[in-house]
Structures are given as C-alpha cells and as structure tokens.
Image (tube, rainbow, N blue to C red):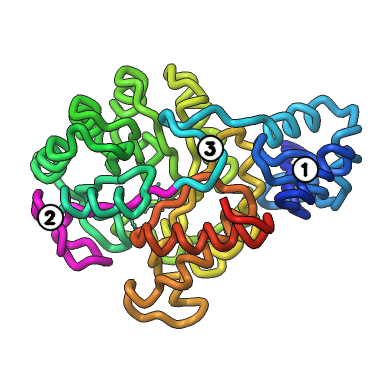
Amino acid sequence: MTDAKLYLRPLGFLYGDAADAALNSGVALPLAGGPIAFTAVELIEGSASESERQLLAATAVAASRDRDVAALLDRVTAPRPPFAGLLLDRPLIMGIVNVTPDSFSDGGLYDKTDGAVMHAAELAKAGADIVDIGGESTRPGSDAVQEADELARVVPVLEGLSGFNAVISIDTRKARVARAAAEAGAKIFNDVSALTHDKDSLAAAAETGLAVVLMHAKGEPKTMQDDPRYDDVALEVYDYLASRIAAAEAAGIDRARIAADPGLGFGKTLTHNLAILANLSLLHGLGVPLLVGASRKRFIGGVSGGETPETREPGSYAAAIAGAAQGAQLFRVHDVAGTRQALAVWLASAVGKGS
Ligand code: 7PJ
C-alpha cells in the first residue's frame, strides 16, 4: 500500500476499580493518561480510501517493536497537561452563550449584552467549567458576519464578565475578535475553522498565548451541508486535525495549548456524525484533549426524532456520555446542569461510587 498511514483505535474500556486492577496487572493501558483503561486496539494501516484493520489485545500492541506503533501508542496513553489551566481528570463542561440574533437554538433570547452576561453567570452557577461566547452563528446555512458587528456583539459581553469565575472561551473564526477577547480576559480561542478562516489567526493564537480548539469542518457554514462526501470520515477528520495541530505547532502554539474537535454537524451527514462518534477514541492518537460538540444538533433528531433543538436535549446527554465513555475530555453544551447530571450519573455508575 502506498502512502500507508497508521492509526490506533483504543477499544474495550474499563472504568473505576476494574481499570485500576487491569492497569496494575498490566492487561490494559491508560487512555490519555486518565482514569479509563483500554484492553484492545484496532490497528489501522492505510488511508481513507483503502485500509487494513486488525483487532489486537492492547498488551500485544504495547509489545510491538515497530517504532511508529510505539510512538503512536505513547501519544494515545500519555497524560494530557491541564488545558487553559483546567485539570482534565474529569469530564469538563463548556457552556454555550450565543450573542447572535439568529442563533438557532435559543432564538436570539440572549442577543443583548446583559442577557448574555446573565446567561453566562447562570451557566457557571450550574457548573460550567468554561463558557463559550460566540457572536457569529456558524450553523448550517448561516451567512458570514462582519468583523465590526461581531466585535460589537461580543466585546461588551466579555467586558461584563471581567472577574468571572469560569474560564472564558471565544467562539470565532476571526483573529481580531480573538485578540480583543484575549485583552478582555478570555483564555480559549475556539475556532470552527481550525485557524484557517483568517490568515492572521495562527499568529494571533501564538502571540496572545490563548489555548485553542481546532475543529474539523468541511466547507463553509453557508454550503457545508450540500452533499458532503468522505471515503472514510473518521480517518479524514483525523488527518485534517493532525495537519492543523502540526500547523499550529509550527506557528509557535505549544501542543499543551491545543484541543481537537471532530466538528459534529459541520459538513457531515447523519451517517458521518454517527461514524465519528463510534470511532471517537481514534482521535486520542492526536495526543491532545478532545472536545465533543453534539448539543441539540440536527443529527440527534435524525436518530430518534426531535424536530426542534430544545427537544434534542436527552439525545444530547446521550451523545456526551458516548464521548465520555471513550475518554473525551471536554463537552460543549447548551444545558450545563442537565449534562452535568447525566455525566455524573454515568460516571458514578461506571465507577460504582459517587464523587
Ligand atoms: C461547535 C462550535 C462545535 C466547537 C459551534 C452549534 C453550532 N465549536 N461552535 N465545536 N458548534 N468547538 O452550536 O450548533 O461543535 S456553533
């Protein structure tokens, strides 16, 4: 096979005492250095168009003398440093604050500065570790927003949050917005274009020292849902994110400041979104924390019904749990209290005790 690349997909997860016992007796390996252990690995060699797959015991992969396998396995198992100052020893919740008049899920309810500031405070009280402030709707079909309009929307909100107790993230594709947000105290540059939309974004991230979320999207928001196609969506998303992490590092952004996100709903059909979720653990090979943004997205309605975003909340909890069960570290959600409860009950029942 020409151009064969290597991927490792951890499988067979253990939690709590079972994970500890398996790690101590050497029959499992730690997932991203966290409390979850994995017992099996799908070893994938090839490319999105042609791949060979083998299911192996994790211990067999650990015993491999192949240097590429060993290096990749190191990335899968290595502990992740704190992200934007936050320890990754439990699922972290990023609450969504839209400051957009056309936001699809809250109908523009929070489009005024005071409303957005109040909403952010409510999310923090409900247990959000991060609040993500966005002034440009990137939902499917939406138009681009002018920089001046976006700045006018988000800067007063960020200023209203000075001294705020949760970490502040700015959801933007624009370098100037990210720079203004950094001045106003934001710690995370969450970019659905993975720092590609604006040619100054890599430099803005490097110079401000912001942590970055690099998200996969295929195409622009306006047209991304017009018949997206992939040979193998999970491998193509992986390759894209790997290339964006490399570009970020080359621009001077330390790997410790990077998280990766497969971008559910961004140029993906229902089948693509589900393939990504089912293969999520593959992305630990990127060697950075993973963020999952499934909240209220259309694919949830596609699985089980749920015409309006508000009715997709139970499915959003389930998608977050599916991500957490595979070791994803960050969850971008609308309903912070509900997601927190869902993740807490899942974790407590997987581990067999409350925290
Ligand atoms: C995402 C995002 C996502 C990250 C939006 C929506 C559309 N940022 N911004 N991941 N989605 N990192 O909330 O439905 O999935 S805007």
The CB of the residue at mark 3 lies under 8 Å from ligand 1:
no
Q: CA distance from mark 2 to mark 1?
A: 45 Å
What is the secondary structure assignment of the residue under circle 3? loop
Give whichever of discs 3 and 1 has the lower sequence position. Answer: 1
| Secondary structure mostly taken by the magenta-highlighted segment of the chain | loop
**Residue 221 placement (x, y as % from top left):** 32, 55
Q: Which mark is residue 254?
A: none
How packed mark 3 is, by other alpha carbons closer than 10 Å (few <14, some 14-19, many 20 or more), is some
The CB of the residue at mark 2 lies under 8 Å from ligand 1:
no
Give whichever of discs 2 and 1 has the lower sequence position. Answer: 1
Q: Left or right? Give the position of 7 relative to 175.
A: right
Q: Left or right? Give the position of 318 relative to 98.
A: right
Screen quadrant of the N terminus:
top right
Of residues 199 and 108, which is closer to you in this image? 108
Looking at the rendered structure, the kind of residue marked 1 is: Asp
Q: Left or right? Give the position of 99 relative to 41.
A: left
Looking at the rendered structure, the kind of residue marked 2 is: Gly
Q: Is residue 98 magenta?
A: yes
Which residue corresponds to the image point at 16% horizontal and 48% vertical from the top-left?
Answer: 117
Which residue corresponds to the image point at 36% horizontal and 81% vertical from the top-left?
Answer: 307
What is the secondary structure assignment of the residue under circle 2? helix
Which residue corresponds to the image point at 57% horizontal and 48% vertical from the top-left?
Answer: 328
Q: CA distance from mark 2 to mark 3?
A: 30 Å
How packed mark 2 is, by other alpha carbons closer than 10 Å (few <14, some 14-19, many 20 or more), is some
Q: Which residue is mark 1?
A: 20
What segment is highlighted magenta in the picture?
93-115
Q: Which residue is mark 2?
A: 115
Q: Which residue is mark 3?
A: 88
